[in-house]
Image (cartoon, grey):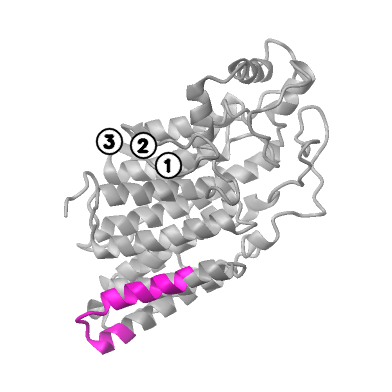
């Protein structure tokens, strides 16, 4: 693997470990981090190509000054410094052992990349990296709703609406509503209010209704779960603090593995991290806004009231409304980006959870990104936490947003990055 791609992968691996261990980094919060983190590589790449104006035109709120001597910029040195600085400023509650790991990673890569380089170039590149990281962090901090949300995931004043079919905190796991105002977070590319979902049918317990039939589907699948359904459910579950990263991080893990197995150019790797980050973030802002608009109860509550009063989902229901599925929105957004860059005919095995013994994390093989996103969405059904309509609408919403993010450019002029098959190096 080319050094610069290995460097980026290592820093994204650190971010994955942080979100798996640090409390408060919920799935939308993690997606927002990757949105801004992706700008590090994009801005440094554009600087290296003397093309920073392309990013500034598309994101005018981001204050970046043109750097001099761009042709002499060492991308690796600059990214290494930028990544360490950005993580330390973005997450202020990282424990000592993870901060130490990040410091050691920065030092290791600096020693490797400095060999044979002009000392003045090294200092200049570190300076550019610091400037870019600080500018992106300050831009992120201007978003009051999203800034440091990992420190305040819950609004004590928020009371979910009541009534038939309305989501309420689960009696057995009475956590308050997670990030009820996330739909107001600043997006990168889309106007989230214009990316809604199919309106829900009037709530009913009628046996001929979509609610009853789809709740019955979950109940039937669970009696009992087949090995395959149990594997799919646990394989894609994620978001268990101390065991796994978030569902947002899961797609970063997939990208890390894919780039390691199929190394592209540095430019295409940067583009992949950049676009996936902002697509994930925008998709979950839109998704969360709709969740709290409809405030649909989880199928577990519906089944207990209308089908079997002692039924339990395979995994306890998350503490936020059901419609649409965030997992599915992530899959739709990320697969759209990945397909646009690498095509949809792949031979890929996901090893994200291969070393876990607490659940079925055995690797699974896929022939397309579409199949991965569809299975990720479906996994929420045997898990017992989403209706099928949640998953279908989440996929559709995420795909629409991913398609819009695909239009973003990092380089212009003759610098445009080619689409299509991966170039071998």
In the displayed structure, 109 sits above or below 42; it is: below
Q: Quadrant of residue 267?
A: bottom left
Answer yes or no: do the residues labelled 2 and 1 have beta carbons within 8 Å?
Answer: no
Disc 3 on helix, strand or loop?
Answer: loop
Graded by Cα atoms within 10 Å as few (under 14), some (14 to 19) or many (20 or more), the crowding at tag 2 reads many
State the residue in front, 301 or 260.
Answer: 260
N-terminal label among 2 and 1: 1
At x 69%, y 36%, the residue is 294
1 or 3: mark nearer the eye:
1
Between residue 60 and residue 112, name the one nearer to us.
112
Nearer the camera: disc 2 or disc 1:
1
Residue at image location 42% in from the left, 49% down from the top: 253
Is 313 positioned to the left or the right of 244 in the image?
A: right
Query: Where residue 221 is drawn, which disc sits there?
Result: none
- Whether residue 29 is visible here, answered yes or no, is yes
Q: Which of 184 and 78 is in front in this view?
A: 78
Give the residue drawn at x 50%, y 57%: 17
Range drawn in magenta: 101-123
Left or right, 160 with reference to 372:
right
Instruction: Specify whether 234 is left or right of 151.
Output: left
> For the view shown, which residue lies furthest in the left direction?
425
x and y percentages locating residue 111 in the rendered image: 30, 78
**Which residue is labeled 3 in the image?**
347
Disc 1 to disc 3, how far (Cα)? 18 Å
Residue sitting farthest toward the top: 208
Image position of 414 with respect to 349: above or below: below
332, above or below 27, in the image: above
Q: Can residue 139 be seen in this view?
A: no
- State the residue position of label 2: 369
User: Is residue 122 found inside the magenta-colored segment of the image?
Assistant: yes
Pinpoint residue 173: horizontal percent, then vertical percent.
76, 40
């Amino acid at each position: 693997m080319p050094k610069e791609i290995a460097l980026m992968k290592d820093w994204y691996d650190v971010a994955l470990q942080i979100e798996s261990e640090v409390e408060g980094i919920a799935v939308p919060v993690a997606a927002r981090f990757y949105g801004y983190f992706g700008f590090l590589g994009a801005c440094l790449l554009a600087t290296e190509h003397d093309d920073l104006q392309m990013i500034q035109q598309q994101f005018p709120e981001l204050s970046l000054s043109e750097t001099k001597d761009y042709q002499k910029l060492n991308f690796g040195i600059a990214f290494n410094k930028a990544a360490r600085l950005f993580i330390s400023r973005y997450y202020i509650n990282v424990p000592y052992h993870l901060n130490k790991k990040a410091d050691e990673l920065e030092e290791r890569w600096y020693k490797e990349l400095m060999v044979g380089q002009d000392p003045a170039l090294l200092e200049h590149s570190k300076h550019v990296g610091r400037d870019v990281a600080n500018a992106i962090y300050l831009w992120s901090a201007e978003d009051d709703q999203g800034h440091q949300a990992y420190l305040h995931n819950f609004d004590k004043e928020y009371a979910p609406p009541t009534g038939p079919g309305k989501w309420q905190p689960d009696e057995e796991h009475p956590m308050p509503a997670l990030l009820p105002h996330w739909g107001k977070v600043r997006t990168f590319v889309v106007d989230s209010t214009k990316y809604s979902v199919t309106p829900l049918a009037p709530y009913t317990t009628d046996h001929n209704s979509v609610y009853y039939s789809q709740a019955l589907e979950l109940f039937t699948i669970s009696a009992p779960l087949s090995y395959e359904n149990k594997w799919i459910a646990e394989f894609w579950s994620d978001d268990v603090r101390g065991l796994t990263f978030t569902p947002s991080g899961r797609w970063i893990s997939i990208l890390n593995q894919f780039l390691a197995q199929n190394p592209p150019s540095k430019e295409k790797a940067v583009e992949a991290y950049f676009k996936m980050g902002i697509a994930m973030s925008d998709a979950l802002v839109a998704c969360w806004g709709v969740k709290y608009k409809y405030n649909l109860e989880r199928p577990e509550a519906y089944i207990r009231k209308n089908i079997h009063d002692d039924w339990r989902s395979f995994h306890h229901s998350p503490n936020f409304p059901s419609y649409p599925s965030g997992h599915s929105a992530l899959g739709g957004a990320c697969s759209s980006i990945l397909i646009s860059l690498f095509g949809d005919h792949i031979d890929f095995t996901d090893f994200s959870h291969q070393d876990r013994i607490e659940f079925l994390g055995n690797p699974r093989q896929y022939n397309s990104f579409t199949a991965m996103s569809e299975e990720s969405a479906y996994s929420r059904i045997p898990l017992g936490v989403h209706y099928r309509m949640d998953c279908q609408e989440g996929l559709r919403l995420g795909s629409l947003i991913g398609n819009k993010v695909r239009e973003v450019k990092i380089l212009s002029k003759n610098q445009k990055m080619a689409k299509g098959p991966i170039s071998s190096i």
